[in-house]
Amino acid sequence: MSREGRVTASSIAKDLRAEIRAGTYKPGDRLPSEAALMTTYGVARMTARHGLSMLKDEGLTVTRHGSGVFVRSFDPIVFDSTGSASDDSTITPVMDETDAGLTVRTLAVTPAEDPTEEARKALGLQPGVQVTTRERLHVKGRKPMLHGVSYVPTSIAADTPIAEDEIGPGGTYARLKELGHEPVRFHEDVVARMPTIEEIEALRIEPGTAVLQVMRTALDAQGLAVEYSRIVLDGGEFMLRYDFDA
Amino acid sequence: MSREGRVTASSIAKDLRAEIRAGTYKPGDRLPSEAALMTTYGVARMTARHGLSMLKDEGLTVTRHGSGVFVRSFDPIVFDSTGSASDDSTITPVMDETDAGLTVRTLAVTPAEDPTEEARKALGLQPGVQVTTRERLHVKGRKPMLHGVSYVPTSIAADTPIAEDEIGPGGTYARLKELGHEPVRFHEDVVARMPTIEEIEALRIEPGTAVLQVMRTALDAQGLAVEYSRIVLDGGEFMLRYDFDA
C-alpha cells in the first residue's frame, strides 16, 4: 500500500485497483468494507467511501446493497453476427424469440411511420417514404440486456406478419425470406459510448458501464436494403463476435 | 425550461440535454457559459458548473479551456476489419503504416517472451511457448487514437522483420504472407468498456468516453493461429465496420 504522505481516496483506489489487477481480489470477491479501509488507512469514512466509489465509476466493481462491494465479473453473452449459434451463451441475428436464456419482449409495432433520418439513409429511402418499425427488449431473468428497433420499408411489410404484434418463428428475417427478400448480406457499424439517461433506466445499466450500439443493414440478393436495425447492448453483459475471410 | 420548484444542477442538465437532442445546440456549438446559466436560472456558480459537468460526464460535451463548453461532435474514423480501404477516413487491419491521416509509432518490439494468458489461449499455444510482441500507437496529429499489441509465435517470427523495429511495408500481415502464413481468416471479439487510468493517459481520452477493445485472431490457410492482436480504440474517435454474407 502507498504510505508516503497523506492517504487520499485516490491512493486507496490505486491500491485496490492494483490488487484487483494482480488477482489478489478476483472477479466476484468482496473488497474490504468502508470500516476496514478506515482502520487500515486511518482515514475518515468519507475518504474510504470515495475511494471505493472511484472504482465503481471505472466499472471495476459493483455494489450489492446490504452485502458490500464486489469485483465485477465479465462473463459475456456472445452476440454473434456472422455465425450460427454454437452454444447456449450465444445469440445471433436470426433469433427473434428466445435464446441464450433471453426472452424477447415486443414493446411496440408501428405499421407505418416516417423513419428516423438515420434509418432513412441506411435503407436508402427518399424523404416521405414510410417504414414499419418493431421495438423490442431482450431480457435475462428480470434484467433488460438489449434494446432493438427494426425498420422495414412499409412497401414490403404492409399486410404481413412484420406489421403484426406476433411476427412468428424466426422473426423478421424469416418473414422477409418468405416475401422473396431474404437477407443475404449485412453491413454493420459499431460504436461504443456512454449510455443515455433513458438507456441507463431502460437497461438498468451499472455505473461505469458503456453500451455497444450496432447499426445493421440487411440486403437481399438484389442488393436492396430490406431492414435496418439499431441495437443497443449493455456493454457489461455482451461481447460481439465476427468470423470472416480475408 | 423546467421552472417548477428549486432549480438544481440536474434540472439544468436536463434542459441542456433536451436542447442538444432537439438540435437547438448542434455538434460543435458552444453551450451557455456558467455566468449565462447563473443569470437564466438564478442559481449559484457551483450549481451551473455542476449542471455542465454532468453533460460532460455523459460524453455529450467537451471543454476547450479558455473558450467554453461545446457540444461534442462524432465524426469517426472507420475501422474496417472486413473491407479494403474505400476512402481517406477508413483504416483496415492491413495498414500498418499510415492511413486515414494516422501515423503509426512502434512503441516496443520484444523478440521473445511469455505471452499473456489471453494471447496464449487465442493462439492455442502450450504454456511456456514464447511469442514475439509488437506494441504500437496510432496517432492523429498529436492525439493518440489507438493502442495495439500484436503477438506472433516466436517459432514463426524469429529472425524475420516481425522481430525487428522496422517491419517494412504492409506490416505483420505482409511479412506473414512472405513466410507462407498468409492470414486468410479472422476471428474478432469486440467489447465496450470504460478506459483504465493508464488508457485515459495514453490515449488522452475525454471524460465520458468509452473504449472499444478488439481482440483479433488471424488464421492461415492451414487453420493455424498466426497472430493475435489486442487493439484498444478511443470510442470517441472510431466506428467499427463489418460487411459479411449471411
Image: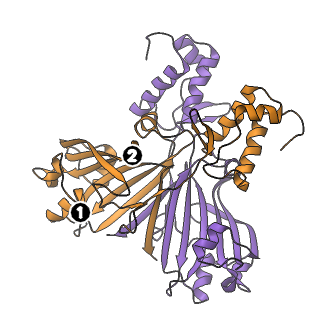
Chain colours: A orange, B purple
In the rendered image, the residue lying farthest to the bottom is B180
Q: Is residue B39 visible?
A: yes
Does residue A58 show up?
Answer: no
Residue B50, how many percent across, how many down?
60, 24
SS category of the residue bearing label 1 = loop
> Which residue is tagged 2?
A141
| Mark 1 closeness class: few <14, some 14–19, many ≥20 residues within 10 Å | some
The quadrant of the rendering that contains the N terminus of chain A is: top right
- Where residue B35 appears, as percent x and y from the top left, is 61, 17
- When asked about the image quadrant of residue B133, the answer is bottom right
Please state the horizontal and vertical placement of residue A214, each as a whole percent of the image.
Answer: 41, 53
Which one is nearer the viewer's eye here, A233 or A129?
A233
| Outermost left residue | A159
Q: Are marks 1 and 2 on the same chain?
A: yes
Locate residue A176: give its quadrant. Answer: bottom left
Residue A224, which numbered label?
1
Q: Which mark is residue B37?
A: none
Amino acid on which the number 1 mark rests in the picture: Leu
Name the chain under label 1.
Answer: A
Give the side of residue A158 with respect to residue A27, left or right.
Answer: left
How many numbered markers are drawn? 2
Q: Could you say where residue A211 lies in the image, as x and y percent from the top left?
A: 48, 47
B17 horizontally vs B164: left or right? left
**Amino acid carrying mark 2 in the image:** Gly
For this view, does B150 lie left or right of residue B219? right
Q: Nearer the viewer, mark 1 or mark 2?
A: 2
Q: Residue B10 versus residue A223: which sits nearer the camera?
A: B10
Name the subunit of mark 2. A
Q: In 3D space, how far apart are the residues under numbered discs 1 and 2 (Cα atoms)?
A: 37 Å
Q: Residue at x 73, y 31 (%)?
A: A35
For marks 1 and 2, the one nearer the N-term is 2
Side of A183 relative to A236 (left or right): left
